[in-house]
Image: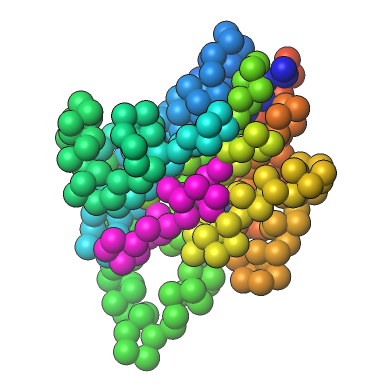
Amino acid sequence: MPVALICHGGAGNWRPGSEQDALDGMEAAAQRGRSILRAGGAALDAVCATVAALEDNPIFNAGTGAVLNFDGDCELDACVMESRGARAGAVAALKRVRNPVLVARKVMEETDHVMLAGEGAQRFARTMGFGDHDPVTPARLGDWRDKRAHLDQVLGRHSLKMRRFLAEHPEYAGGTVGAAAVDAEGVLAAATSTGGVTMKLVGRVGDSPIPGAGNYASAHVAASATGTGEYVMRALATRSISEAVERGAALPNALRDVLDRLGRDYDADVGLIAVDRAGNAAALHRTRDMPHAWFTGEAALVARMRVA
């Protein structure tokens, strides 16, 4: 079976001057996954390695460098899923770990559960040997202080709704990182990780840790979503992609149909990536930017800021 991998670094508007750093980060992360697949490794290993690399890169909103909630803390969400046995593991509102995607994998492999949240997820992480790690970076803390002051001014008693505010100031929105892959045995896997949305309410959980919403792997497709999670959850976006392919749709058409529905029903700022069992990869987004990288088969790895 042909191998393939695609990853993304979050849909939105990247700040001027940051584009090349984002593309370099995407390419480096994708190369980690590619080396695993080209050596005959598993799709699950490839997507976890790719996403862990993005979590370790502070320019992305996942792991170290994730955005802060209203109280100034990082609450991290992540999910992994493998088509073989429909195995899935997830963590939500997890604090003080370096790589939440790897904790999510341990949930899948070491427990009978699919998701652990909050304090329980942190206790589990420590039990599994994940040490204490502060993911808050000085840059994110500085951004949080500025945004907190601005939100207090703009979102007062006679305020704009947060949706309108984020539409007018897209640089304040968060993002997500994710990867999807198929290995030489035809097994598909997806992994997604995020810090959520800047200034989110404490305890907010988005689409990323929810199988079928922000992350999904079936016998037909592996997919990851990024953008406004509340709408991705309502649409079950990644499962919808899989169902369309199962009905016979080509992968790019399946992504387009789901993205169009998210736009029509919710005017949602969303991006999607996916691979299918035949080794095809596709990406689409409704935002200006979505840094992403991919390779299929023996072809060269490609990294782009937006879909042409």
Residue at the (18%, 33%) spot, across then down: 126
Secondary structure, magenta segment, majority class: loop
State the residue in front, 1 or 134.
1
- Locate residue 193: give its quadrant: top left
Q: Position of residue 256 (x, y in %)?
A: 75, 53
Q: Which residues are magenta?
A: 196-216
Above/below status of 284 relative to 144: above
Q: Position of residue 281 (x, y in %)?
A: 71, 34
Q: Position of residue 207 (x, y in %)?
A: 47, 55
Above/below status of 248 relative to 39: below
Q: Is 237 situated left or right of 204 in this image?
A: right
State the residue in front, 234 or 56.
234
Residue at the (60%, 41%) spot, across then down: 223
Q: Is 220 situated left or right of 28 in this image?
A: right
Residue at the (65%, 16%) spot, across then down: 184
State the residue in front, 26 or 236.
236
Q: Position of residue 245 (x, y in %)?
A: 75, 44
The N terminus: image quadrant: top right
- Locate residue 260: give its quadrant: bottom right
